[in-house]
Image (cartoon, helix red, strand yellow):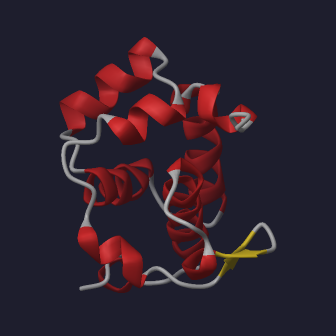
Amino acid sequence: MKKHRIYTTSFASVYPHYVTKAERKDRTKAEVDEIIRWLTGYSQDELETILENKTDFETFFADAPKLNPLRRAVKGVICGIRVEDMEESTMKEIRYLDKMIDELARGKAMNKILRK
């Protein structure tokens, strides 16, 4: 099976787009980081190391300390695809993150984004 190109894309190359999307809607980089830490279990220091090392998406998710089981409560359409209908894969993990960043940019409260 051919790998999707995003898998080999560095997380650091996409991360600024997440932050920009949030900041355009008066949200913060700290909130983006909180979502990422919640989803993956990385500490802030680990996240900063990943960004510095330009870790690719596949490794980013494969090495995540603890993918949050509540991520499966993330539902809806992102990029024309219903997240909950996707098979388990790195792409599904990426779409969970994309959906949560979209929710942040749309003004959803953090406790709802983090499924509290």
59 and 31: which is toward the camera: 59
Q: Is residue 83 above or below residue 8?
A: below
Q: Position of residue 15 (x, y in %)?
A: 55, 38
What is the residue that sits farthest to the top in this orientation?
53
Where does the image place residue 53, in percent across and percent down from the top left? 41, 13
Residue 113 visible in image: no
At a point 66% along the width and 58% down the height, the residue shown is 24
Q: Residue at x 50, y 34 (%)?
A: 58
Q: Is residue 65 above or below residue 97?
A: above
Could one spot residue 67 in this view of the protein? yes
Q: From what the image shows, is residue 104 above or below residue 49?
A: below
Residue 116 spot, x, y in % from top left: 23, 85
**Horizontal arrangement in the rendering, residue 86 relative to residue 32 (left or right):** right
Count of residue discs: 0
Residue 47's image quarter? top left
Q: Nearer the viewer, residue 104 or 90?
A: 90
Relative to residue 45, is residue 82 depicted above or below?
below
- Residue pictured at 58% horizontal, 49% vertical: 18
Q: Quadrant of residue 86?
A: bottom right
In the image, taking residue 60 as reference, residue 96 lies left or right, namely: right
